[in-house]
């Protein structure tokens, strides 16, 4: 009897696999397969991968497939000799790219792109928060003031998304969703991604799944910038810069003091990827000096954000506590990915979302 282990009972209710999704996976299994559902709480925060409990290790022994939040080395050790495919319900894979994973022959997939639609909507909300002056309205309401002055001033920063330029650093599953929405509202979209000419079909497009089209449909009208010099041009030309690159050694700290200084005066800065991509101290300086319109931040260098962080008190900062991906639609997309990949695995076809262990995503 072949076994698949489902270890997705996250301690946070919204990320705990629902019963209907478990049954959908079970129904997709052919004769001769069994599904073991782990009831012990898992932890999918960050990239997941916290050490498993004995119940999980016992279930993985002799199993062929493991579905969890991250893949700690203990999973690979317990399933040595039988484990063929492991999948993470998280998009990031930093905690899973340990030596055991790099040496392992198992197929490794993740959930990149599954979070794209809700994250893109959060990004759009953050952009409009500043472009339409909602920060002024929120501040005035908190003080019980009817204040039109920030909107009516000759130099008001209140503007429109249509006709502006949105630069997306990391045009993958999330970036594509942002780009399609921004372009649909009339923005010019600049995109920058690693190896702009490579085949991205290994990642599921939330856009493609939602619209029944191809991923390429989400690239229509996007101006892709070359890797060499592209980032400097994106920073210089964009009215809004959206950061959606994965956290890898190559991207960590890439938006340093010098590069943040190249943002256009009055630009909006949005980060929904990882806090370590950005020099947070330098960003605080840019915001304090009013060199940019504002920043929408869902991720931070240290999480939870420390109580003494100046980001709490800056009026031109919109903070969300690393929740941009939260959506009740997650399990519909995640289950579809798992079931599709299960079919591919059983038929010996290439899996979607295979992780590039060298690139780190």
Image (cartoon, rainbow, N blue to C red):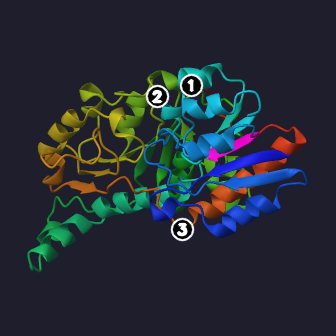
Magenta segment, principal secondary structure? strand
The magenta stretch spans residue 64: yes
Task: Identify residue for label 2.
Answer: 248
Q: Secondary structure at mark 1?
A: loop
Which residue is at the front of the view, 350 or 17? 17
Q: Quadrant of residue 184?
A: bottom right
Residue 80, by quadrant, is top right
Q: Give the residue displayed 48% in from the left and 41% down from the top.
A: 47
Q: CA distance from mark 2 to mark 1?
A: 8 Å
Q: Nearer the viewer, residue 217 or 276?
A: 276
Against 175, residue 315 (above or below) is: below
Residue in view at x 20 percent, y 71 percent: 138
Q: Are marks 2 and 1 in contact (CB under 8 Å)?
A: yes
First in sequence: mark 2 or mark 1?
2
Nearest the eye: 268 or 16 = 16
Q: Secondary structure at mark 2?
A: loop
Residue under the image location 52 percent in, 59 percent down = 181
Pointer 3 or 1: first along the chain: 3
Q: Secondary structure at mark 3?
A: loop
Residues in magenta, as a range = 63-67
The CA span between labels 3 and 1 is 30 Å
- Verify whether residue 16 appears in magenta: no
Q: Which mark is residue 359?
A: 1
Residue under the image location 65 percent in, 68 percent down: 19
Q: In the drawing, does residue 49 fall left or right of residue 164?
A: right
Q: Is residue 290 visible?
A: no
């Amino acid at each position: 009897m072949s076994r698949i282990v489902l270890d997705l009972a996250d301690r946070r209710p919204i990320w705990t696999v629902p019963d209907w999704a478990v049954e959908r996976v079970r129904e997709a299994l052919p004769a001769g397969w069994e599904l073991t559902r782990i009831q012990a709480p898992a932890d999918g925060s960050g990239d997941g991968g916290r050490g498993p409990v004995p119940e999980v290790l016992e279930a993985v022994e002799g199993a062929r497939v493991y579905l969890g939040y991250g893949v700690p080395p203990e999973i690979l050790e317990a399933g040595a000799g039988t484990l063929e495919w492991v999948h993470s319900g998280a998009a990031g894979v930093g905690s899973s790219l340990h030596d055991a994973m790099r040496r392992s022959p198992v197929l490794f997939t993740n959930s990149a792109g599954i979070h794209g639609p809700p994250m893109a909507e959060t990004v759009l909300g953050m952009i409009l928060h500043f472009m339409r002056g909602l920060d002024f309205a929120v501040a005035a309401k908190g003080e019980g003031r009817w204040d039109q002055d920030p909107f009516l001033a000759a130099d008001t920063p209140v503007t429109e998304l249509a006709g502006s330029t949105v630069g997306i650093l990391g045009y993958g599953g999330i970036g594509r969703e942002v780009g399609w929405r921004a372009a649909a509202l009339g923005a010019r979209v600049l995109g920058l991604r690693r190896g702009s000419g490579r085949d991205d079909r290994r990642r599921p497009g939330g856009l493609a799944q939602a619209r029944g089209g191809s991923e390429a449909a989400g690239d229509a009208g996007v101006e892709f910038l070359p890797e060499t010099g592209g980032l400097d041009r994106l920073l210089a030309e964009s009215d809004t810069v959206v950061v959606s690159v994965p956290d890898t050694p190559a991207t960590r700290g890439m938006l340093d003091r010098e590069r943040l200084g190249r943002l256009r005066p009055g630009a909006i800065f949005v980060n929904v990827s990882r806090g370590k991509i950005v020099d947070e101290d330098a960003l605080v300086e840019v915001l304090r000096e009013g060199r940019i319109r504002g920043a929408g931040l869902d991720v931070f260098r240290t999480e939870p954000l420390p109580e003494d962080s100046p980001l709490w008190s800056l009026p031109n900062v919109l903070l969300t506590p690393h929740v941009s991906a939260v959506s009740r639609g997650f399990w519909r997309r995640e289950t579809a990915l798992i079931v599709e990949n299960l079919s591919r695995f059983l038929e010996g076809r290439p899996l979607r979302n295979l992780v590039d262990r060298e690139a780190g995503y």
